[in-house]
Image: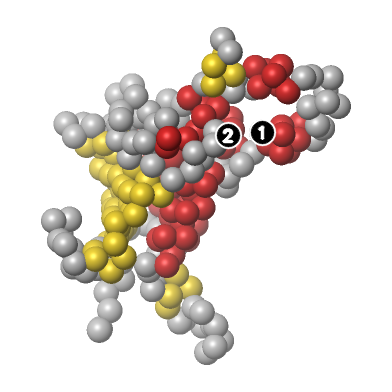
Amino acid sequence: FREYFKKEFNSSIEEKGLTFEKALKAKKVLRNEKLTLAGLLFFGNNPQNIKPAFCVKAVSFFGNSISGKDYRNKPQDLEGTIPDLFDKGIKFIESNLRHIQKKQNFNSIGILEISRDALVEILVNALVHRDYLKNAPIRILIFDSRVEIISPGKLPNSLTVEEAIFGNPVIRNPQLVKFSFHTMPFSGIGTGLTRALEEQPNIELINDVEGEQFVVKIPRPETNT
């Protein structure tokens, strides 16, 4: 938390004339002598010890069926703070996707088959805007034909996919948004999905109202192998 505070204010807690406890209360990490949910998720030690469902379940399948039992990468529970989950989630996705040679040097690693910038936007969006009233994990599912990132909770306040795409934000978790601005690649102005679609136009966004989840499907390029 000290590192975060200094990043936001360019001064230490002491330089601002605060005690550590007062700084926690000022940033709504502590309320009524208890850790807030936002404080736990961003600054807690092992948040999943208290909220085990607020992890990211990640799995890479052979084939294209969610009922498949042949795994390229066995199911994992990614744990930690929200910034930790972001870092681990991106690493998991990158390690299970192909790199494609285009105009790079022959010895270069190539570029990721799906836009990394789009993946970053989608994963940050899932972590920050999911419904934390639902006791369920975010899921990263990698198939031969696509990547799916599924976050608990439908879009809030009757927001439609079209409205979300065109930058009409309805902020479900305002304190998480504030913390994310200083800890992750996050602008906080409600244009994450717009940027993701600019980078990867074939993304499919599904607001599953009945299932109360938001599903992002990103096709993978076909291969000859």
The answer to whether any part of residue 112 appears in the image is yes
- Name the residue located 42 percent from the left edge and 60 percent from the top edge: 92
Q: What residue sits 41% from the left and 49% below the top?
A: 78
Closer to the camera in the image, 24 or 161:
24
What is the x, y in percent for residue 89? 43, 53
Please indicate whether residue 13 sits to the left or right of residue 178 in the image.
Answer: right
Q: Earlier in the sequence, mark 2 or mark 1?
A: 1
Task: Work out whether 59 lies above or below 153.
Answer: below
Decide: few, some or many residues near mark 2? Use Cα within 10 Å; few <14, some 14-19, many ≥20: many
Q: Amino acid at mark 1?
A: Phe
Relative to residue 165, is residue 181 drawn left or right? right
Residue furthest to the front in view is 49
Tag 2 near tag 1, CB within 8 Å: yes
**Mark 2 to mark 1 CA distance (whole Å):** 6 Å
Evaluate whether residue 177 shows in this view.
Answer: no
Which residue is under mark 2? 43
Q: Position of residue 151 (x, y in %)?
A: 33, 40
Amino acid type at image mark 2:
Phe
**In the figure, residue 53 lies in which quadrant?**
top left
Residue for badge 1: 1
